[in-house]
Amino acid sequence: MNKIYAFIIIIPLIAMLFLKSMTFYEFDTKQRYIKNTVDSVAHKVMITGVLTVSDKEELMDKLRKLSDFEDEDVSLKCGDMQSDGTITGLYEYVLGNVLDRGEVFSIYVQSKDESTLSRMEGNSDNENNKLFYKAKAICRIEKIQPEGG
Amino acid sequence: MDNEIRNIGNIICYPTENKLKKAVRIFQSERGGGFGTIFLGLAAILLAFVVFINIADYSIFTYKRNAISKAMDYAVTAAAQQINKTQSIVGVANAFDEDTGEKLLEGVEIDIDMANRTFLTMFYENYKPDDLSIANNLLICATSTMDGKLRYSIKADTEQKLDGVLDNPVLIEERINQAMDQLWPDTEDNSQVYIIGNPKTNMIENGTYLFAYIKDIKITGLYLQRQISLSSFAGAKLERKL
């Protein structure tokens, strides 16, 4: 009988640890994939100077496989680097616009829903504690101008 | 009796072996076996918990390290574009070889102060650490070519600066390592910069390049703090406009 009580204590503990491990693993893996996806897009724009409509669709397809992402959850911005080496006044990037060498391109994505890990940890009560899948990359266009930059 | 080594026939029984047998008998008995199960179960859970915490700690550390590494790539690519036009040779008359008509990319200098500032801006835009400042751990080295020789300028700790000329670009690796020893003599980390695989795979040739190195930065995972050094490298990708 004592052994039954023992299992009543131990099995839930093992189950809880297992679930925590699984949710952490899921968050970590998805977060890494999302960061890699965003970095790939930033790198592409860094070399070519442009993000096309099909590139954005491809990005959304990849993101939606990992979590709930809508078009408005992806922020694309561009602008100039100031003469003092700072970045200010970035504005919305229009898909298909070809950026010049030296301009700055920024991409930021954040999932619509919080992660399973966040829900499991009970972070949902406070908006600031919610853990979303998000990634950011800012790069400077380094393509060589076609007319010889 | 338990503490004595007993020789039964050809089998030697050690005291610990006896204790182990006793323990096994207690767990096998019907009476009081529950506590044994609880004890073993909790020990296994504790072990699994420690393993889980360590894996999570290392996982967070590697995520941060990769993000910093990527931020360095973006930063060095941005900083390599800070060409100092007043110090560089510009103009069509100087941009082409008189005999062959080939474009010349000699004498194009990176403004190392601006490159340093741009690097830090771009780095912090990509990776905003709560407890990490790299300004005093950053070394950047800009190179350019003049009369077939490699000119370099090394800046570290935001203020210190070293300039020089090398006959062969292969020597830049040794120069950067010397500069690191000179600028950070008390460092615990003895890691060195490796740019040259062999003379044929030397990444730095005569040209305009920017090299960045962050030394001894401390990254905290879940609870452990690890110290690492990272490097990044970019060419200025120059062209001449007509």
Image: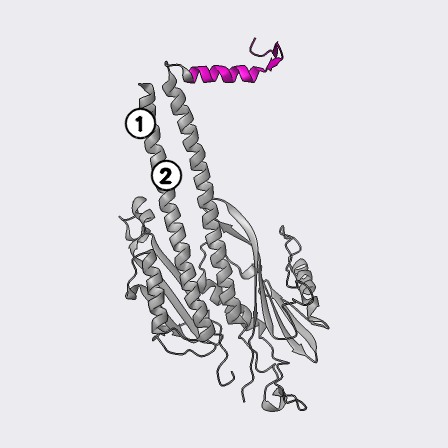
Q: Amino acid at mark 2?
A: Phe
Chain on which label 1 sits: A
Where does residue B128 sit, x and y in percent of width and height? 44, 59
Chain on which label 2 sits: A
Residue range highlighted in magenta: B1-27
Badges 1 and 2, same chain: yes
User: Considering only vertical position in the picture, is B22 above or below B158?
Assistant: above
Question: Which label was assigned to residue A32?
Answer: none
Q: Earlier in the sequence, mark 1 or mark 2?
A: 1
Q: Secondary structure at mark 2?
A: helix
Q: Which residue sits at x=68%, y=70%?
A: B169
Residue B149 magenta-highlighted: no
Front-most of residues A90 and B29: B29
User: Considering only vertical position in the picture, is A9 above or below A29?
Assistant: above
User: Does residue A45 appear anywhere in the picture?
Assistant: yes
User: Does residue A89 appear anywhere in the picture?
Assistant: no
Question: Pointer 2: what residue?
Answer: A18
Q: Residues within 10 Å of mark 2 (few under 14, many from 20)?
A: some
User: What is the residue that sits farthest to the left in this orientation?
Assistant: A125
Residue B22 magenta-highlighted: yes
Q: Residues within 10 Å of mark 1 (few under 14, many from 20)?
A: few
Question: Pointer 1: what residue?
Answer: A8
* Alpha carbon distance from label 1 to label 2: 16 Å
Front-most of residues B114 and A61: A61
Where does residue B224 sit, x and y in percent of width and height? 50, 44
Q: Amino acid at mark 1?
A: Ile
Where does residue A147 sit, x and y in percent of width and height? 49, 86
